[in-house]
Amino acid sequence: MIESFATMAPDHTNEGDGLENDICFILTSAFLIFTMQTGYGLLESGTVSRKNEVNILLKNAINIVCGSLAFWSYGFAFSSRETDISSFKNQTVTSSTGNNPMDTTYHSTFFRSNILTPERMFIRVTNSEQIGTTYAEMAFQLAYATTCTAIISGAMAERCRFLSYFIFSFFSNILFCLPARWTMFNGWLSHYGAIDIGGSGTVHLVGGCAGLLAALLLGPRLGRFDADRKFRQVPMGNPTNAVHGIILLWWGWLGYSAGSSFGVAGDKWKYAARSSVATIMSSMAGGAFGMIWSALTLNGLQDIKIISYSILAGLVAISGGSPIITPIYSIITGVIGALLTMIAITLVERLNIDDPTDSFSVHAVAGAWGLVAIGLFSDSDSVIHYKHGYMVNITVSEKDVTELRESLLLCQLFAIAIFVIWSLIASAILLLPIYFTIGLRMSLQEEILGPDYVEHGLIHDGNRLLLDVVKHKIRLVYNVGLNEAQVSGPLNHHYAEQQRLRQLRKRSLTPSPVVPTEEVLPKFRTIYAEERMQNKHGRYYHYHERKRLPIRTILDSNREKSNATNFSGRFRVMATTTSGTSRQPRCLSSSASVWTTRESIPYRSNVRSNQRMFQTTMAPIID
């Protein structure tokens, strides 16, 4: 079996054939990396609410549209090296500055003097011998650059304006291009000894930090935190999409990691094979840890989000050093990466930062750990071979190994600091002008309606908009998706409030005072109740609230607790009437759909067969 497999290995005695094989391998890897956009889109659309899933998928398509145009116009000029891929052919290294493809004498500065030449900016190759190598390198780097932008899009999900994101995605290529040049393509960081072969730092750490800044500028989503700034779990809109997404990412990541060897000619195929195994083992270890973590923290339940993010953390952590880390250490790398990600998710939530897809925790934290893991677990001989163009027939002295071990970890820590500083500064330069001009975030009404309807005019089961014809105009109504229930009411809060006050005054025995609706919203006393039939027991959660709320905060939980969005899909609301006596809940039949009394905000309940739901009312109390 082994002999027959060996006979199938390509013969690399001819340098031309070796280069052609390298180009073919690089292009195949680039095609696999492009499929990761689909994986990211499905994972993110499954994580957000259903009224936003089409928008988040389209944003990943925009990443390729804008990213390709930007990389062709200026990105490749910043990231490309002076020597082309043909310099990675199997060759003898005669000196530190001879034919070594990792030589950095020309790239020891932040920027090249001839970086913005027309040939570099718009990739006009005049030498026919360089057509294959230049375009293959461009396609591969383009796939990496769009991946970095996809990471940022997850942190901006559900509340970012489409036009603002379109502008940002065009210029966000610069976030990846310069760090990639510094480390991955013969730059000054690689000259000082830093290693990031597959982009743990240049792609994931940079993208995760930029996503964190974008999330801070946008602020939390509607209903993400309550009045006490406590975290509220947002249910996944489509878990099936999330699982499909992580499987597609798994597939694309094999090309993402193995392709970092830049070919299979000479001895590079050996490192491509090790990279594939290390990637699989690290992701497997991360997923196994996620299953254990979920079982321990959720009383035996296997949470889809925890397991998916743990697998993804293992993939991110191993990316930077997959060709030079042995399988046993790749397992350790994946486990620690998943652990740090779970801890980071908890800390980010406690800091009241709303990251819809946990881009910072999964990509930035696991990516930083991946760079540290290179300094701790990388095979010394493999590191030296890598620095000589994956040449395994090089004599490695004991002194070289000792010096490498002493300096590599410090170099990796220094690279992490550089990547974080660069990402925050560059993303601030890109985001702040948009923030102060056209704005990043949607309006309150647009966020409630959801970008699927506002930006794309789509009406589907996820956003189920209601249209109400009033006289000669159509009055839009808002729709807050809460997994199993929909809370609906008029967008024109002032009109609806006046109608409710007018009806209450007609019913009251004594005249009620006139309350300016622009200043005060009626008070509410709410009781939250839940009963699960499949568990054969009832659990009730009581919460009493009597607050004077500004009219604008009925749907804005960033300022005060929002009565309309203060419960998840498994909860229903019962409110006291004006006399102070509470209404008794009335059990509804399966798949029932009812509306409450006219004086309250209308609710509609879509009931599952395995749960008992109650009719809901919310009656205002006027002093």
Image (tube, rainbow, N blue to C red):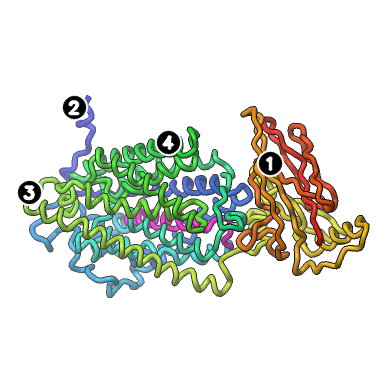
Residue 100, compared with residue 315, is above or below; it is: below
Q: Nearer the viewer, mark 4 or mark 2?
A: 4
State how far apart marks 2 and 3 are (Cα).
Answer: 28 Å
Q: Looking at the rendered structure, which numbered label has been put on residue 324?
A: none
| C-beta proximity under 8 Å, tags 4 and 3 | no
Q: Which residue is mark 4?
A: 291
Image x and y of residue 393, in percent: 10, 46
| C-beta proximity under 8 Å, tags 4 and 2 | no
Magenta-drawn segment: 135-161
Task: Name the amino acid, label 2.
Answer: Glu
Q: Which residue is mark 3?
A: 395
Q: Is residue 334 left or right of residue 479?
A: left
| C-beta proximity under 8 Å, tags 4 and 1 | no
Q: Residues within 10 Å of mark 4 (few under 14, many from 20)?
A: many
Q: Main secondary structure of the magenta part?
A: helix
Task: Name the amino acid, label 1.
Answer: Ala
On the rendered image, what quadrant is the C terminus found in?
bottom right
Place residue 195 in its image quadrant: bottom left
Q: Which residue is mark 2?
A: 3
- Secondary element under disc 3, as helix, strand or loop, is loop
The mark that comes first in sequence, 2 or 1, is 2
The mark that comes first in sequence, 2 or 3, is 2
The mark that comes first in sequence, 4 or 1, is 4
State how far apart marks 4 and 2 are (Cα).
Answer: 39 Å
Task: Name the amino acid, label 4.
Answer: Met
Q: Is residue 511 left or right of residue 355?
A: right
